[in-house]
Structure formats: C-alpha cells, structure tokens
Amino acid sequence: MMKRIIGALVGREIDRRDGSGGVKGAAMGWAAGSMLRRMGPVGTALGAAYIGKKMYDRRKAKRGL
C-alpha cells in the first residue's frame, strides 16, 4: 500500500516538472511504483527520500530562503 502511494507521488512530481498534466505522469508513477515493489525496502526508502527532497525544496522556495 505504501509503495503505491509513493509511486503516485513520484508520478505527480514528474508531471509537475513536465508542466502538462495527463498520461505521462500517471504512466511514470505506475512504472515507479512497480520498480519500488521489485526493489523492496530499499526502493521504498529511495522513493520516500525523493518525495521528501522535492517537498523540502518547494517549501524552501516558498519561504524565499
């Protein structure tokens, strides 16, 4: 369950970077989720770290630091 959520968040971040919504982010999220499941706990940690870094950068940019 957690890996699917992280896969969806990774897909959303990829879609935001692209700028246009649609199928590309969903497909990348699905691919990321399946890769995370195959990698086991290491994949989950990597996905969570990627999402955490993106959230940290976005918050830092919002504050103007």
Image: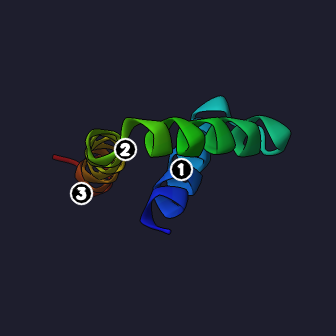
Label 3 CA crowd tier, 10 Å (few <14, some 14–19, many 20+): few
The amino acid beneath tag 1 is: Gly
The disc labelled 3 sits on which kind of residue? Arg
List the single residue furthest toward the bottom.
1
Secondary structure beneath disc 2?
Answer: helix
In percent of the image, x 46 and y 57: which residue is there?
Answer: 3
Indicate left or right for 38 with 22 as reference: left
Quarter occupied by residue 40? top left
Residue linked to disc 3: 63
Question: Which numbered tag is attached to residue 43?
Answer: none
N-terminal of the pair, mark 3 or mark 2, is 2
State which tag comes first along the sequence, 2 or 1.
1
- Marks 2/1 in contact by CB < 8 Å: the verdict is yes
> Measuring 52% from the left and 54% from the top, which residue is drawn there?
9
Q: Nearer the viewer, mark 3 or mark 2?
A: 2
Residue 54 at least partly seen: yes
Where residue 42 appears, as percent x and y from the top left, is 26, 40
Residue drawn 28% across the image and 52% down it: 52
Task: Tell me the number on the disc at residue 47.
Answer: 2
Q: Are marks 3 and 2 in contact (CB under 8 Å)?
A: no
Residue toward you, 6 or 52: 6
Horizontal and vertical percent position of residue 7: 53, 50
Which residue type does callout 2 highlight? Answer: Gly
Q: Give the Cα separation between the discs numbered 3 and 1.
A: 27 Å
Say if 4 sits above or below 41 in the image. Answer: below
Q: Position of residue 48 (x, y in %)?
A: 31, 51
Mark 2 residue crowding within 10 angstroms, few (<14) / some (14–19) / many (20+): many
Q: Which residue is mark 1?
A: 7
Earlier residue among tags 3 and 1: 1
